Image: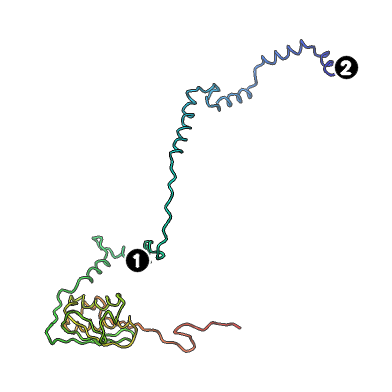
Amino acid sequence: MTDEEKQGEVNPPEEIAAEDAAGAQETPAEPQQERERAVADAQPGGTGEPVAESEQQPADAAAPVAADEEAEVEFVEETPRVKPEIPGMDLEVDIVREGEDALHAEDEDEYGEAEGEAAEEDFAQPIADAAIDLAAGARYAATGKRKTAVARVILKPGSGDYTINGRALDLYFPRPALQRTIRTALETVGLEAKIDVIATMHGGGVSAQAGALRHGISRALVDADPNLRSELKRRGFLTRDARVKERKKAGLKKARKRPQFSKR
C-alpha cells in the first residue's frame, strides 16, 4: 500500500476539503496585516491601488523631450592652440613683487592716493625754477664717479648733443636703458635741448660709466645753479654710489666663498 492510500484512510477527502475552506476564511495575523499595509504604501499609488494612465503619462512624455535635447546638442570642436614663435610671448605678466601691495596700501594718504605714485609723477616733472646762464662762453665742469669709473664732464650751451671720448652717445652706450639714465639729469632741469655735454671717461664697465656720467652732469648743474642742489639731491642724482666689489680674503676663493670642506 502506498503512502497516499494510507493518508486517504486516515483523512478522507471530504475532511481535507473542509479544512482548506476553513483556513481560507480565517483572518490574517496583525504582523502580517502591518506588512501588507507597508507594501501597499510603498507602491506608486500610495494605497496599493493601480496607478492611473494619466498619472504615468507625464513621466513617459519627458523621455522623448530629453532625447530631443540630446539630439540638439552640437559638439563644437576646439581650435588647436597655435604655438607662438617665441615661447611665452602670448602669456600675460602676473609677477608681483613680494610685499609691494602691502607697501602701497600703507603709503595711501587720506585721499586714497598712494605716496609712491605721487612721488613718481613728481619726479617726472622737470624743475621749473632752474636759472642757468646760457651765454655763448659759459662752461660748467665737474667730476662724477661710480665704482671704479670716473667721468670728467663739461657743460656748454648747445643743442643737446653728447660727446663721450670723441664719440656720440648712441655709439658709446648702445643700450637704451643706459641712455635714459644719462639723459635723466638734463631732462629733470628741462634743458635737454639747450646744453651740450662733453665728457672724458675711464675705468669701470658700461653701467658704471653711465652712472658716473649722470653723477658728473648733476654736479655740473649744481655748479651752474646752486639752487638746484636740494631737488637733485632729493632725486638721488648727487649721491655718490660707493658700492664696489668686496675684496678677496686670504684662504678663500673669493670674498666669502670657502673651499669645500673634507673631513678625511
Write down the residue under mark 1.
Answer: 100
Q: Position of residue 258 (x, y in %)?
A: 50, 83
Q: Residue at x 21, y 81 (%)?
A: 161
Q: Residue at x 46, y 83 (%)?
A: 256
Query: Which element carries disc 2, helix, strand or loop?
Result: loop
- For badge 2, the amino acid type reads Met
Is 70 on the left or on the right of 41, as rendered? left
Q: Residue at x 22, y 85 (%)?
A: 198
Where the C terminus falls, by quadrant?
Answer: bottom right
- In the image, which disc is placed on residue 199? none
Quadrant in which residue 239 is drawn: bottom left
Q: Is residue 133 above or below residue 66?
A: below
Question: What is the C-alpha distance between the residues marked 1 and 2?
Answer: 110 Å
Q: Earlier in the sequence, mark 1 or mark 2?
A: 2
Q: Position of residue 149 (x, y in %)?
A: 31, 86
Where the N terminus falls, by quadrant?
Answer: top right
Is 128 on the left or on the right of 238, as rendered? left
Q: Nearer the viewer, residue 61 or 102?
A: 61
In this view, the residue farthest toward the bottom is: 250
In this view, the residue farthest toward the right is: 1
Write down the residue under mark 2.
Answer: 1
Is 212 on the left or on the right of 19, as rendered? left
Q: Is residue 175 above or below residue 108?
A: below
Q: Nearer the viewer, residue 128 or 193?
A: 193
Q: Is residue 88 above or below residue 226?
A: above
**Residues at discs 1 and 2 in contact (Cβ within 8 Å):** no
Q: How many marks?
A: 2
- For badge 1, the amino acid type reads Glu
